[in-house]
Structure formats: C-alpha cells, structure tokens
Image: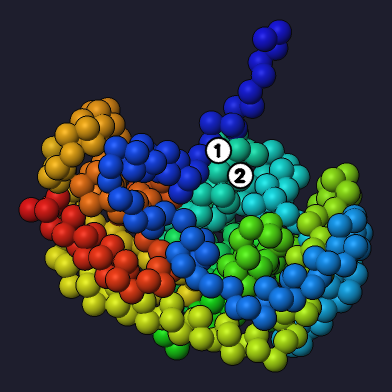
Amino acid sequence: MRQKLLSAGASELTYEIREIVKKAELVQQAGQEIYWENIGDPIQKNHQMPQWIKEIIGEISLQNEAYGYCPSKGILETREFLASLTNKQGGVQITPNDICFVNGLGDGIAKVYQYISHTSRVIGPSPAYSTHSSAEAAHANHEPITYRLDPDNHWYPDLDDLYNKVKYNPSIVGILIINPDNPTGMVYPYETLQRMIAIAKEFKLFLLSDEIYLNITYNGSRAYSLAEMIGDVPGIAMKGISKEFPWPGSRCGWLEYYNRDKDEEFNSFCMALDNAKMIEVCSTKLPQMAIPRIMQDARYADYRQRVNNKIGKRSEFIADILSNMPQIRFNKTYGAFYNTIIFKDGVLREGQTMHIKNPKIRQMIETWTASEMPLDKRFVYYLLGAKGVCVVPISSFCSDLQGFRVTLLEEDEDILQHTFNALKEGIEEYCK
C-alpha cells in the first residue's frame, strides 16, 4: 500500500472466546462431539425463552412502526422507563437524555474507548474480559493496564494494586468495573465499590461500570449498581438485555451517563458518544420497544429469580465436582454465569498430554501444541481433543495466571454432569 494501512493497535484485537471455536469445529469435523463451554449464550445451552416473552415480541413485530428508524439515542418512552428504574434506586438521578442505546454492549464498549484520547488510559480488572481489554489496548496502541483480581481472596480486587497504579500513572483517566464480573463470577462487595469510587474521586477519574449481569446473582449475593453509590463522581454504566432476558441476538444495550454536570470534559465525552450514534442513525428498534412491556410484566421478576436460582444450583453442582481437586484453586461464584478455575503453581508443565483415541485429532492437537504457547492454552487444546470440552484459557483474559473459564449455563442435567466429570477426568489425567 502507498502508506501504512493497519493501525498499530489492531494487533491488540483478540477474542479467544470465539477463536477457540475455529479449533473446536475442526475437532468436531474429525468426529469428536463438542461440549461448548466457551461462550455465555444461554440459548445455545438449552435455555427456553418463556412463551409469554415470545408472544410480546411477536406482537410488536406485527406493528409496522417496528421496522422504521427510531431517535438516534433510542425510543423516548423506553429511555423514560429505564431512567425511572435508575432513579428509584435512590442514588444519582438521571433523565432520558442521559441514556443512549447501542447495538449491544460490544458496540458501546468500542465507542467508549474509541473516543478517549489516545494518550489517556482506562485501567480494568485482570483477568480481563477480552472485549474491554482489547478495545482499550487498541485505542492506545499499547497493551492493557490492569488491576489485579485476587484468586486467593474470592477474586476481589487488590485495592492497593489499583491505588498505586492510578497514583503513579497519570495517563489513567478512568477505572473499569465489571459487576458481576466476567470471567470470574465475583460480585463486588459494597465496601470495595466505595473504595474504588473514592479512588476515582481523589484522582479526578471517571468510572466505567459494565453491568450486563447486574440482575444475575445467586447464592445469597446482591450486586450494587454504580448509580446507587457513585455520589458526585462522573460515570457511565453499560447495560443491556442480552444476558438478562436473555436475548443475545437482539444486540440491544444502552449507556447511562451519571453526573455530566459535574465535569465539562466528561460532558463533552458523553456528547461525542451521542453524536457517534447519531452518525449511525440509530440502534436496533424492535428490542427497545419490547423492554418496558417485558420488564413491567408481573411475571418477569419471578422468571428472573427462578433462572438465577437454577444458575446458583449449577454453581453448587460444579463446586461439588471440582472444588476439592488438589491441582486447582477453586472459588465459588455469586454472579453472572461463569467460573474461572486456576491451576496451582507448578501443576502445568511442558510435555503433559491426555490420551486421544482418534489419530486424526491426536495429530491435530500435537501440531497445534508444537509451537510455543501459554501452558493453560496447551491444556485447553488437549482437553478439547481428548474430552471434547471447549473452554477458554485464562491467559487469553489478559492475565499471568494459568487456568480456564467455564460457563454455568447448561440446562440439560445429563450434559452438565457429563461435561464437568469429563473436565475433572481431563485435569487428573493431564496433571498426573
């Protein structure tokens, strides 16, 4: 090309959650049945959307207006409804103009980091959710800046690590919170959030809170929203329906802006995000029309509670199988629908294998693992080839730890039991 075409930050755009699918599909084509534990799609894992929700969506789909454009920031009636939900929490108060719809949080995440100055950084948790860490690193043309989540303390943030990195890195302008957390399933304690907000206030930062799993908690936990606690610190909450309804294929999320009036620079940033959506005309319309009708339905709260209870029971089931294994560090989960499992130091080594019956698959796995790679990724490939269980290595979540992420979504109890017993057998065989 006449000039350099590719941005230096493009090399940071990785998404192992989907990349592992390419490998798994090759193994599947070679004859191995695959048990998909790589991605948080409840529908793929046998969840049935209630008939009454389908009927609401179906009725809306028959309305001619559902097929046209909507206002760039989103349907006013829906934004009014969502603003009222936030205001009822008793914390920061917002108006419909403080809400902007996006095409799923993937779109929102990309836009937020795209319009931050290239010399400014947002520090996020590690293990990191790849969409955030990749987008932030790509915008800065540099590897992500992260604060540590501690596997020996329920995956809670290391607040000393966060404070020192913020204090000694003046390029940091924001702190990312993912609550409940993906990939660990940790729910941030109230006191921890208070301290993180205090750090943001002390250093004049804004807070970015990914709350896509906010209403998915269990085992006695409760997730506090940023709006409840933020006080007068500027912040953005990212919300959506892909996990909660769940309707991941809707690609429907929204940004909520808090305390725009407290900082002119932050207000200008929010205006830029709105303008970016205006250039695109609007986000998906039909799901926006469905949100108030579904959430206000008397059946919705009970449905969500029943689904949460089922996820909690599956978390207990998985804990019964894996929690006492000597090779791993296991934490019980309290929110979202993931668990991150870490190998103890020294357990993973070069040269470890599992028996793979199919010679074509065995050759495939041996070829893939012949090159240098993180040890947990090597384990993941052997687990895929030998047991057909598709998980994601934790080294791909911007972490120095060695382990893997699973989901808590499988609703077929026979498949769930087979998958995690196979996972246990794989760990025992590989680490003997």
Could you tell whether 296 is left or right of 150 in the image? right
Residue 237: image x %, image y %? 69, 66
Residue 144: image x %, image y %? 52, 44
Specify the quadrant that holds the N terminus: top right
In the rendered structure, which disc, 2 or 1, sits on the residue that comes first in sequence? 1
Residue 15: image x %, image y %? 50, 43
**Res 252 quadrant in image:** bottom right
Q: Amino acid at mark 2?
A: Ala
Q: Quick check: can you spot residue 228?
A: yes
Secondary structure beneath dot 1 equals loop
Q: Which mark is residue 13?
A: 1
Alpha carbons under labels 2 and 1: distance apart: 7 Å
Q: Residue at x 60, y 38 (%)?
A: 138
Q: Which mark is residue 168?
A: none
Residue 419: image x %, image y %? 28, 62
Classify 10 Å Cα crowding around label 1: few (below 14), some (14-19), many (20 and above).
some
Q: Residue at x 32, y 80 (%)?
A: 316
Q: Amino acid at mark 1?
A: Leu
Could you tell whether 260 is left or right of 367 in the image? right
Q: Residue at x 42, y 44 (%)?
A: 21
Could you tell whether 105 is left or right of 35 in the image? right
Q: Residue at x 82, y 79 (%)?
A: 81
| In this view, 46 is above or below 118 | below
Q: In this orientation, which residue lies closer to the viewer: 16 or 386? A: 386
Kindly indicate whether the residue at mark 1 contacts the one at mark 2 (C-beta within 8 angstroms).
Answer: yes
Secondary structure beneath dot 2 equals helix
Classify 10 Å Cα crowding around label 2: few (below 14), some (14-19), many (20 and above).
many
Residue located beneath label 2 in the image? 135
**Res 85 quadrant in image:** bottom right
